Amino acid sequence: MLILATLPWITSILLISSVSPVLAQLNSPVLLAQVNNNEQLEELLRVGREYVNAGDYQNALAVYEQASLLDGQNPRIFSGIGYLQAYKGNFRAAVQAYQQALTLDPSNPDFYYALGYSLANIGDNSNAAAAYYYAIQLEPEAIRNYIGLGVVLLRKEDYQGAADAYKRVIALDPNNAEAFSIMGSALIQQKRLDEAISYLEQAIRRFPNNSELRLQLASAFLNKGSLEIGLQHLKAAEQLEPSNLKIQLKIGRILEKQGNLEQALNTYRRASYLHRNSPEAQAGIGRVQLAQKDYLGAIVTYKELVEILPQNPEPYYYLAVAFKERKRTQEAKKYLEQARQLYQQRNNKQGLEKVDKLLKEL
């Protein structure tokens, strides 16, 4: 997973000058008329930093956008906007801001890295990889560029490229556990499971407290069909990181497959409690409730899931299943029709077939 850290360029722009003690002065038209653009810009940047320090990113963003109107040729203002948009999760807006910053300063590796991060977060892995490549050309010793590149290349199923990125990270930093994780994931996705297991076991001996490596080792065993061994490694990973959602979901899924429904339900509920509105945890709860024939509970769960994923047909379909089992036919038909519309939008023939089959049973 890519981690958005406080990057040096946002720090530099926020440290341009000291903090103004009186924010209200900024709103005075008399004061604004008295100062020239440079003084006004300096004041805006001081106020922007005060908002950032207070955790008020919405107002900080508004201030930096106002600053960009005063100085449209300052790339660091646009990079600051990009940082704040990314922090708020508005990655498409962040992409636009970083692209503007790069138009003004095309040789800044920090901007390319941030652009790659933002593109990766909207699923544009090809352009993200290109941004990381540019960052590497400008800053070939920066480990973060190779890690970001390795992640998006894994998503693109370019396993050799990801492995090359991993090797470069290890050459720069032999103790970087994230690089070992990239390589382990590449081996697993290539179905080189025995090789992955051997590699990850060695990596864990080197990094015994790394939960991600243990999670990958568990995934390798699960892909081989070794559920019990996989579960043991997941439990070890859970001890290291009890609130990790991926670990909880995998444990729940194994318990489901083993028919241990009560423990699976408890695991999914714990994951849902720790990660509010997690669609994966909610879906797990719903699956177990249907398997336990707790149809009333499943109705409640899938109604919540519909709120979380209103454009996903699956919750509507399983909500219809639960209503059917409660012999509430009209409600079942209503949700089946909604599921049908969404399956049609996705051109999902298999989904449409199962909707038609359930309609016939009604």
Image: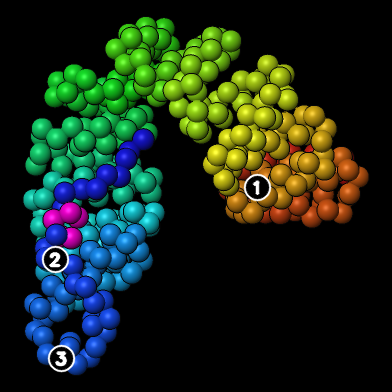
Question: What secondary structure is found at the residue carrying circle 3?
Answer: helix
Provide residue 4's location: percent of width, then percent of height.
Answer: 30, 45
| Residue 206 placement, left or right of 275 | left
Q: Nearer the viewer, residue 51 or 143?
A: 51
Q: Nearer the viewer, residue 299 or 115?
A: 299
Quadrant of image for the N terminus: top left
Image height check: is 100 above or below 335? below
Q: Residue at x 60, y 40 (%)?
A: 273
Provide residue 166's location: percent of width, then percent of height.
Answer: 24, 24
Question: What secondary structure is found at the residue carrying circle 1?
Answer: helix
Q: Earlier in the sequence, mark 2 or mark 1?
A: 2
Q: Earlier in the sequence, mark 3 or mark 2?
A: 2
Q: Amino acid at mark 1?
A: Leu
Quadrant of the rendered image containing residue 55: bottom left
| Residue 92 placement, left or right of 134 | right
Q: Which mark is residue 18?
A: 2
Q: Amino acid at mark 3?
A: Ala
Mark 1 → mark 3, Cα distance in angstroms:
53 Å
Image height check: is 274 above or below 73? above
Q: Nearer the viewer, residue 235 or 285?
A: 235
Q: Which residue is mark 1?
A: 305
Q: Residue at x 54, y 9 (%)?
A: 229
Query: Local crowd at mark 3 within 10 Å, few (<14), some, or many (≥20)?
Result: few
Instruction: From the image, state whether disc 1 or disc 3 is nearer to you.
Output: 3
Quadrant of the rendered image containing residue 21: bottom left
Q: Which residue is mark 3?
A: 33
Q: Amino acid at mark 2?
A: Ser
Residue 12 is one of the magenta-drawn residues: yes
Span of residues in magenta? 10-14
